[in-house]
Amino acid sequence: MGIETPTLGLAFIAGLLSFVSPCVLPLVPAYIGYMGGRMTNALSAQAALASSGNRTMTLPGIASRFNILLHGIFFVLGFTFVFVVIGMVTSSLIIAARDMIGRFGGVIIILFGLHFMGVLPGLFKRALANPKWLNNPFLTMVVALLGTAFILWGFTGVLTPALSTIDFTGAQQIQIPTIAAIFTLAAFLLWLVLGGAFVNPGLFWTRLVTGIQQAFYTDTRRQMAATGNQGYLGSSFMGVVFAAGWSPCIGPILGSIFTLAASGATDTLSTGLLFATYSLGLGIPFLLTALLLDSARGGLKRLQKHMHKLELVTGSFLVLIGVMVATGTLQSLSVEATQRFSEFSLRVEDCGIGLFTGEIGLDHAGPCFSGAQRLVEIGGTAAGNFNATNTQSDFIFRAEAGTGLTITLIDRSKTIEPVVRLLDPTRADVPVIVSRPEPGADFNTYQIMTETLPTSGVYSLTISNLAVLKDDDDAAYSMIVRQTEAIETVAPSVTGSNTLSTITGAAANVDEAPFGLEVGNRAPDFATVNTSGDPVRLSDLRGQVVLVNFWATWCGPCKIEMPSFQTVYEERQDEGFVVLAVNFMETPEQINPFRESLGLSFPIVMDSDGSIQEQYGISSYPTTFLLDQNGVIVAVHRGPLLANQLSELLDEVMA
């Protein structure tokens, strides 16, 4: 709802609401699988101790819940740590480190699963029972080869990493992950050689397996597992891994926090606290889930005769989760859910924050959450369409008393006959005036205006289309809502009419449209160069639909939206769509690694002195202007713009 500087309370509420967002859903079964596997493992240890005559290990209910809660807390702390680091430092090195955590951590999750299934202890027991297995030099060679492959892949994602790469400017760049992999590989091979794995493999592997057994599978460890007092660091590590394999849904609050971190508008401690508070808000439902799992402990105890089957199921599920984390599948699911259901995620946060802050009341909460009424920010844009069955759109927004209201409605199909109804916070009608359509080359423009608004609060806006549309007709529109100086008079009888006095809106044709930064204006022209030094001028792209995006490499939300731009660019460049990404005062040496890491192929141009940003009044990143084929601004978006949102806008502009 237009919140510029989020508070700790709003960050916490936003995190809490994010738990129901689609991008978090892939994490929930992974978390339940881990916590369920740990609980099953503890119950199995209790059963084993009971069968050996020790019946004192079953915990009272309160102690049991406290232990499961502690595991949840450590999970959330690990999750929060990585989330704060990634939010505060969005350099390519941190991005690479996150990918490494995902690959190495995924393999460790697989080992957790095999441990819960009883595969690892069984394998170690059989190995010690067959000394010939361990005294075979071939085993050392296999382990050396597999270890080499694992180290190279874990650090770099490939088995044949390059030591350096050439960027777009021809400069050579050393790959830090490759260097780290080489040092780690050297240490690994040196450990094998000095430990005698090649000279006396039987002794080396026997000592190693025996040491692992003593560390993880002794009776003392079994008692710790039975009481639940084992593995708090493991739970914290799982939180770290899951955070590395997750992409957050960026709503208004989190987007504002990312922008604060990127711009340096607040001190590092304050911004870090905002990230941590958001993450802890997100963690509360995970803690409640842990307690709900603990409530199922009694039912599991009654299934003790099937405990091994339960261990196999939970362990297998963890192995599957580990594979998904290691291969990046979990993060891909999170990103896909973010893009597919971004509107729902934004609506949940917008409506929840609006309800919490009093921006909307309980009477608006239901329609807002369901999408029956869409939230519009004053000064922001909204888009939609009418067809044969959908002839009405409903919006809500908070406006202040003492000023008037101006709504610019751009009819892209030139077939809409709008009727407008505006209700104030008391549900009383507010008189409005709707201009006759001002025809443009590719659209009609209506201006909707009011006299002085009677009170501050949430207003309801209904736009209906009187035009008769056929089944295959689609009347797309966009609009921007602004508070302005009130018009002098509005007759009460004009409410709902579209044939009243004309109010000059957008120009009758594109050439007469004024230059400006609002929807309906021609975008200011500028000339610059791309990262290779080739000249680029905005006006040279006339005839194409142009997305002008203002961004920087340190901008966290920019990194989130860039893959969406690339996806849509690849899909629709043949239709006349181009992305022009204007970087803020960075060098090609800073830009190109970022570009390569995301696989971006659309044009990136330089704003070395910040003059273009100043020309467009950019105050936060990312900010995006969408221009039609005539260079007229059709939408302005602040914050990350995802693929489905962009595709909907393009469907309207390119229809």
Image: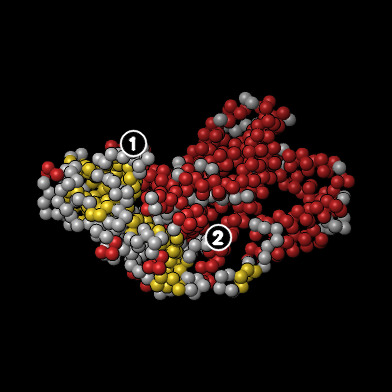
Q: Position of residue 543 (x, y in %)?
A: 39, 62
The answer to whether one can see residue 29 in this image is yes
Res 240 label:
none
**Mark 1 secondary-structure assignment:** loop
Tell me whether the residue at label 2 lies in contact with that at label 1, contact meaning CB atoms closer than 8 angstroms: no
Of 195 and 615, nearer the camera is: 615
Res 599 label:
2
How many numbered circles are shown?
2
Q: Residues within 10 Å of mark 1 (few under 14, many from 20)?
A: few
Q: Residue at x 82, y 43 (%)?
A: 127
The answer to whether one can see residue 551 in this image is no
Q: Residue at x 47, y 54 (%)?
A: 572
Sequence order check, earlier mark of 2 and 1: 1
Of 158 and 555, nearer the camera is: 158
Amino acid at the residue labelled 1: Thr
Of 530 and 630, nearer the camera is: 630
Circle 1 sits on which residue? Answer: 389
Taking the image as shown, residue 157 lies to the left or right of residue 628, namely: right
Between marks 2 and 1, how big is the CA–CA gap? 41 Å
